[in-house]
Amino acid sequence: MATDPGTLEDRTPQAGSVSLTTRAREGDERAREELLAGVHRLALRYARARLGTYPAAAELAADVAQEVCMAVLTALPAYDDRGAPFEAFVYRIAAHKVADAQRAHARGPVTTDVHDEAWPRELVGSAEDDVLAADEASRVRDVLSSLSEKHQEVLILRVAVGLSARETAEVIGSTPGAVRVLQHRALAALRDRWEAG
């Protein structure tokens, strides 16, 4: 049985109910809004995880999430539930949109994040806090990028996006057991490299 796309929202399939995707495809406006809200959350988490090192990453990730929503909305009438989780369908679109954003960034001008001087000081933090946070974030990215692509992808899908082992397996074309092993090895490698650094 296919995973109910409602799991984007609450991760609990509702037995006997018509799937959120089916209701959205049939024109149920509330179902479409609920589905797109879940798609946006999933796409935003994924885009933030993949684009976190880019200048203006928050805005770039938000743009990618919006593009994913538009692509899902466009593809929804032709979507064919073949037993794979709906999240896998969304992930494939998100992966393409992130790759597009990375290519566009490589070709385009570089922007920088700017703190608005009008923000209250307690929201901005001290310059020392900003430097320490940026240094630790940079170290995390360096350690994460030292992993194989497969390990990185499993960690992003499991931790940042929040997919289950079964859903991740569907996305990467593996088994839930293999995903758990990959995740365990990736986390062990991260821990070892973090402690060594």
Image: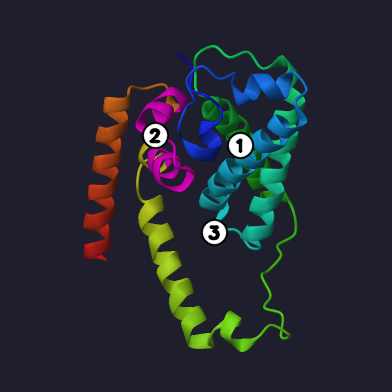
The label shown at residue 164 is: 2
**Quadrant that contains the N terminus:** top left
Spatial CA distance of label 3 from label 1 is 17 Å
The structure residue drawn at horizontal position 39% and vertical position 34%, both measured from the top left corner, is 164
Q: Mark 1 sits on what residue?
A: 94
Q: Is residue 25 left or right of residue 13?
A: right
The structure residue drawn at horizontal position 54% and vertical position 57%, both measured from the top left corner, is 52
**Quadrant that contains the C terminus:** bottom left
| Tag 1: amino acid | Ala
Residue farthest front in this picture:
16
The structure residue drawn at horizontal position 68% and vertical position 22%, both measured from the top left corner, is 23
Front tag of 2 and 3: 2
**Magenta segment, principal secondary structure?**
helix
Residue 87 on image: x %, y %: 53, 30
| Tag 2: amino acid | Ser
Q: Secondary structure at mark 1?
A: helix
Instruction: Write down the region rendered in magenta.
Output: 153-171
Tag 2 and tag 1, C-beta contact below 8 Å: no
Q: Nearer the viewer, residue 69 or 113?
A: 69
Q: Earlier in the sequence, mark 3 or mark 1?
A: 3
Q: Per the image, is 170 magenta?
A: yes
Q: Per the image, is 8 magenta?
A: no
Q: Is residue 35 left or right of residue 156?
A: right
Residue 179 on image: x %, y %: 32, 31
Front tag of 3 and 1: 1
Residue 41, picture quadrant: top right
Q: Mark 3 sits on what residue?
A: 53
Residue 120 on image: x %, y %: 65, 86
